[in-house]
Image (spheres, coloured by chain):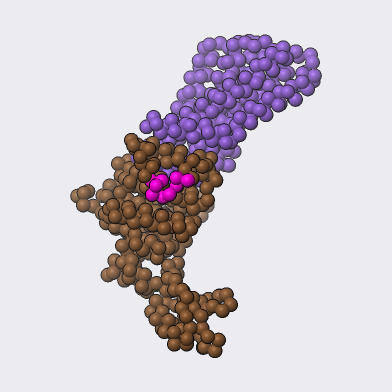
Chain colours: A purple, B brown
Amino acid sequence: MSKLIRHLARHTLLEAREDRIPHVVSTFAIACITLLPVVRHLTMGAGSRGVQDVGLALQWLAVCAVGLWLGLRTVGLDLDHGRAALLLVRPISPAYWLAGRAVGVGVTLMLLVVGLLAVWLPVAWYFGATLQPVLLAWATLIWLEGALLATLAALISTRTRPLFAALVTLTIWVSGHLSSQYQAVMDELGLGVMAKLLYLVLPDFQVFDLQANVIGGLGASPTALIIAIGYGCAWLVALGALTVWSVQQRDHA
Amino acid sequence: MTNQAPAIELRGVVKEYQALFGAPQRALDCAELVVNRGEGVALLGPNGAGKSTLLWICSGLRRATEGTVRIWGRNPRVASTRSRIGLLPDRPALYPSRTAYEHLELFAAAQGLHNTEAAIAETIGRLDLSAVLHRPVRQLSAGQQKRVALAQALLHRPDLLLLDEPLGALDPESSRLVIDALAEERARGTTLVIATHRLVELAGCCDRVVQVRGGSSQRMGLTPQVLTRLPVRVVYTLPDQAPAPSVGTPCPAPPGVCIRQVSAARRETLLAHIQKMGGAVLHVAPMVDLLSPLPDNEETLA
């Protein structure tokens, strides 16, 4: 079965190339060349902070957008177009199909993060930013966030059409980034318990946010990093298991 | 008992699709079907009659809402049962950017085949795919894509082939290749269940015909008997002064040629009239898609 997983992972990677994902890196490079000098000009008093803020945010958004697309593409569209059925009619568990896809998505996202960083490092150096090891921790966490988003999109797309799955995934993702603000509002309304419950039910994407640490040169506590990675991995496993269950339960066409 | 069990046994199968709003849609309503091992069965019926749903339920990829589904006496969702089934869907669901070879490699891995190269080489030879083997599927014609999809169904030499419109989108030459491949499978002892509108071409692969209409199945009889009972469309010419035949229904035709549709019972009368008037019969085509004029269901024939 490892052969099947390898084949599927390779398929996913090759499809990513067809989906113009390398173009994302090129677009980012062009954005760095054209946009960042303007940002530096507008944020003169802030040193390289403004440039770093925009550059890191662009990379983060690119990884999340590609993660969302890959989740929908590899599972939702396969189910929707009937391609998954031709595999699942074979004597394999859906877990193998999803594992192959997951490996492919993981590797694709990793290559994307590495590609974006390769463009970013000389740009950041040119604009006078201090490069610190925390950048690697930040890159790991945006990879994890992209993978989590892909898995969430995959799970939701097993139960609905890809477009609606994209909307639901985006809503959960945005809510997951506003969890602390949401908690404060709910506390004011006296509904703090409900907010905590929702926090448990929905993933909290804020734990993956190290951008302020990178820009401020603050570094990251190893404990916080391990907790964030553990939290992300636990969610990945839980969502992956739910996706397998959901595919097993549904009809195919 | 499992060893003697029929290849397919469907008893009182109901399939309902849940609608988000409104009542569930019933695609199959108490469908019954028994297919013996090594038998070839054609499923006929209009679009939306439930033929594809029936095939998908047999493949184990869809669950029946009610009723019993047994493949060789076992649950079709069990892996050991599925490993012996080959499925060809109506739409060739392939990855547009991947080549035919990559598809076959992937499906061979999913099937757990050990001798992948030999299995692929044999299948592409049977379906004459060698010329397009390394081209992305998006560059292939609809007919070539259909043959690639059929290749994945035949790759592991299944004991049961469930085929949904195997001749759809195929030109006569490709149809011949597919029919020959299916005939080979029949000769090997494979059970075939074919949902089709092209019974005449596939008659050699099917022992009998089952009609699916309104979600339920009716046995129509052995294939030769069904073929003789099919209405026909006759293309003929008549001298200018000759009176038009009184049997059958005239159909639109190009100048100089007449086309008339007639039931099987009146076919000879029409042909005799054309001959008597000095006309010439150019073509007689059985009308498989016109199921309504078929005689009443004759249970004893099946």
Q: Is residue A64 visible?
A: yes
What residue is shown at x 62% (from left), y 10% (from top)? Answer: A132
Q: Which of A6 and A243 is in front in this view?
A: A6
- Indicate whether A197 appears above or below B77: above
**In the displayed structure image, the side of residue B24 where residue A175 appears, left or right:** right
Can you give x and y, in whole percent of width and height, for residue B271 in the image?
Answer: 43, 81
Q: In this view, does A105 lie above or below B252?
A: above
> Residue placed at 56% from the left, 30% from the top?
A67
Q: Answer above or below: position of A210 versus A246.
A: above
Is B50 drawn above or below residue A153 in the view shown?
A: below
Visible in this render: residue B29? no
Q: Which residue lies furthest to the left in this view?
A: B1
Residue B188 appears left or right of A188:
left
Q: Residue furthest front?
A: B131
Indicate the position of residue B104 as horizontal and vertical percent values.
42, 41
Q: Residue at x 52, y 31 (%)?
A: A13
Q: Tell me, yes or no, whether the highlighted magenta stretch contains residue A49.
A: no
Quadrant containing the C terminus of chain B is bottom left
* Circle count: 0
Identify the residue shown where x is 36% and y is 63%: B203
B156 or A127: which is nearer to us?
Answer: B156
Magenta span: helix, strand or loop, mainly? helix
Image coordinates for residue A201, horizontal then vertical, percent: 50, 30
Residues drawn in magenta? B123-131
**Residue B10 locus on image (x, y percent):** 31, 55
Is residue B241 left or right of B203 when viewed as pictured?
right
Quarter where residue B106 is shown: top left
